[in-house]
Image (cartoon, rainbow, N blue to C red):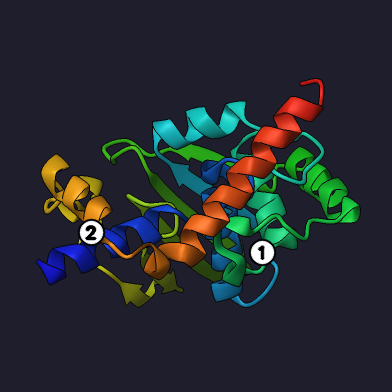
């Protein structure tokens, strides 16, 4: 039926989002940049509370545009220094060499502390920024840009209690439904997003074939 068709399209559009590099560092940088934005001034220090899965994944991948830095601290600090929260997962796209240098200096000075957040799902990031007696907190949960909580000085500015858990969101999907959608959907209505996927994946493949990785 039509509403299922619309749901499948919405799901495709939601999942096929370009990110610069691996999505986890982007989510960490985005949370930190947003927290600094809410604070309204450059923080004196930040605290990152992350689920084990986020810490593990971000430990092992390069932060995009960072000259090979890895880890939560690098992602959080560089995201905050270089990123506009409006850029979402492409938070590092305008990172400059002086911001990379500053990131290293701040990390060395203990500017960012990372804590393991127990009892949360795979994707949980709480960025807390501090300046004087001002504080700001931004929590991302379940999906990479899903902000569920924003506060400043203990005043809640935004709270979304409805969980965006992957399995809940996808309750309507069945293999039969996906096949029916694929067979009947007018490709023109998805041309923009499919073209983007083809272009991006082709560029990745060509880069892999033409360079010696």
Q: Is residue 103 above or below residue 51?
A: below
Q: Residue at 30% of width from left, 58% of height from top? A: 11
- Image side of residue 16 versus residue 41, left or right: left
Q: Secondary structure at mark 2?
A: helix
The foreground one among 106 and 197 is 197
Dot 1: few (<14), some (14–19), or many (≥20) neighbours within 10 Å? Answer: many
- Image side of residue 104 versus residue 117, left or right: right
- Image side of residue 16 versus residue 72, left or right: left
- Residue at the disc numbered 1: 43
Q: Residue at 52% of width from left, 47% of height from top? A: 48
The foreground one among 137 and 210 is 210
Mark in front: 2 vs 1 = 2
* Mark 2 touches mark 1? (CB < 8 Å): no
Dot 2: few (<14), some (14–19), or many (≥20) neighbours within 10 Å? Answer: few
Q: Residue at 48% of width from left, 61% of height from top? A: 193
Identify the mark nearer the N-term, 2 or 1: 1
Q: Is residue 114 above or below residue 34?
A: above
- Residue at the disc numbered 2: 184
Q: Secondary structure at mark 1?
A: loop
Is residue 161 visible to the viewer in this orientation of the structure? no
- Image side of residue 185 versus residue 57, left or right: left
């Amino acid at each position: 039926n039509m509403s299922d068709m619309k749901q499948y399209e919405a799901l495709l559009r939601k999942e096929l989002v370009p990110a610069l590099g691996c999505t986890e560092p982007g989510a960490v940088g985005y949370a930190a940049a947003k927290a600094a934005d809410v604070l309204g001034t450059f923080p004196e220090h930040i605290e990152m509370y992350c689920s084990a899965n986020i810490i593990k994944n971000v430990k092992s991948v390069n932060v995009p545009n960072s000259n090979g830095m890895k880890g939560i601290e690098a992602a959080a600090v560089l995201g905050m220094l270089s990123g506009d929260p409006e850029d979402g997962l492409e938070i590092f796209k305008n990172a400059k060499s002086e911001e990379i240098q500053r990131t290293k200096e701040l990390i060395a000075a203990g500017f960012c502390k990372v804590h393991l957040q127990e009892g949360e799902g795979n994707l949980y990031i709480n960025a807390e920024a501090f300046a004087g007696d001002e504080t700001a907190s931004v929590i991302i949960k379940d999906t990479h840009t899903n902000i569920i909580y924003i506060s400043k000085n203990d005043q809640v500015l935004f709270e979304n209690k409805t969980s965006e858990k992957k399995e809940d969101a996808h309750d309507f999907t069945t293999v039969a439904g996906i096949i029916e959608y694929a067979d009947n959907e007018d490709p023109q209505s998805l041309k923009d997003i499919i073209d983007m996927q083809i272009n991006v994946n082709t560029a990745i493949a060509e880069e892999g074939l033409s360079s010696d990785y």
